[in-house]
Amino acid sequence: MAIFLICWYRRFGWVAIVGLSANLIMQIGLLVLLPGAVLTLPGIAGLVLTVGMAVDTNVLIFERIRDRLREGASLATSIDFGYRSAFTTIFDANITTLISAICLYSIGSGILQGFATTLILGLISSMVCGIWGTRAIINSIMGAAIIVVPSRFKDNNYAISYINTITLFRSWLLITTRYCQYFKY
């Protein structure tokens, strides 16, 4: 999978690999927070399913970026469009899976609850790393400091920059790491 992402998407593939790695680290960190949680075979299956969904997230985003680049848009515009247009599809898929995982957790016992737990935590970390994390990395690497100008300011030449996604991603990763260290000891 990593070789495919790197060969097919080149620089974006490397970003996807970093995002997937952060996703797994965050998911395992969140599992450490749960008292008495043990990673069993169903839990590993939940991890694998989460990785598959995270790859799908990256593929959706990168294909939309690639489509926009083919149309002749600039890199910054393509990145913004790719993430914006893929968000609803990704969010819908993750919410649907989250509802299924909650049903599995509430109806099932033991093994199904372990699978559902890792799946729920994986969906949360996948959304954070797949959407905000990879965008932060892409913006910093490509130098695409995307400035969004709302329509009411277009005539006045004001440029309003939205929240820096790099800072949000770093903060989320730091908070998760600190919580894991706090509850482990």
Image: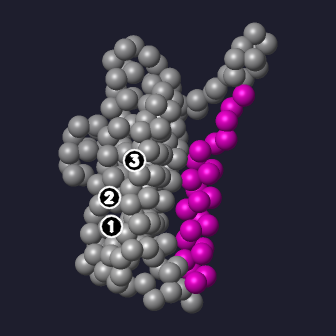
Q: CA distance from mark 3 to mark 2?
A: 14 Å
Q: CA distance from mark 3 to mark 1?
A: 17 Å
Which kind of residue does numbered mark 2 sit on?
Val
Report x, y in % for residue 156. 79, 13
Horizontal side, residue 30 vs residue 175: left or right: left
Most frequent secondary structure within the magenta stretch: helix
Which kind of residue does numbered mark 1 sit on?
Leu
- Start and end of the magenta stretch? 160-183
Considering the numbered disc 2 on the image, is that residue within a helix, a strand or a loop?
helix
Tell me the number on the disc at residue 47.
1
- CB of mark 1 within 8 Å of CB of mark 2? yes
Task: Say which residue appears at 36% left-offset and 52% top-offset.
Answer: 54
Tell me the number on the disc at residue 93.
3
Q: Is residue 109 magenta?
A: no
Foreground mark, 3 or 2, reads 3
Tell me the number on the disc at residue 158.
none
Horizontal side, residue 99 vs residue 46: left or right: right
Report x, y in % for residue 155. 75, 10
Q: Is residue 8 visible?
A: yes
Q: Is residue 181 magenta?
A: yes
Q: Earlier in the sequence, mark 3 or mark 1?
A: 1
Tell me the number on the disc at residue 51.
2
Q: Is residue 134 visible?
A: no
Observer-nearest of 105 and 171: 105
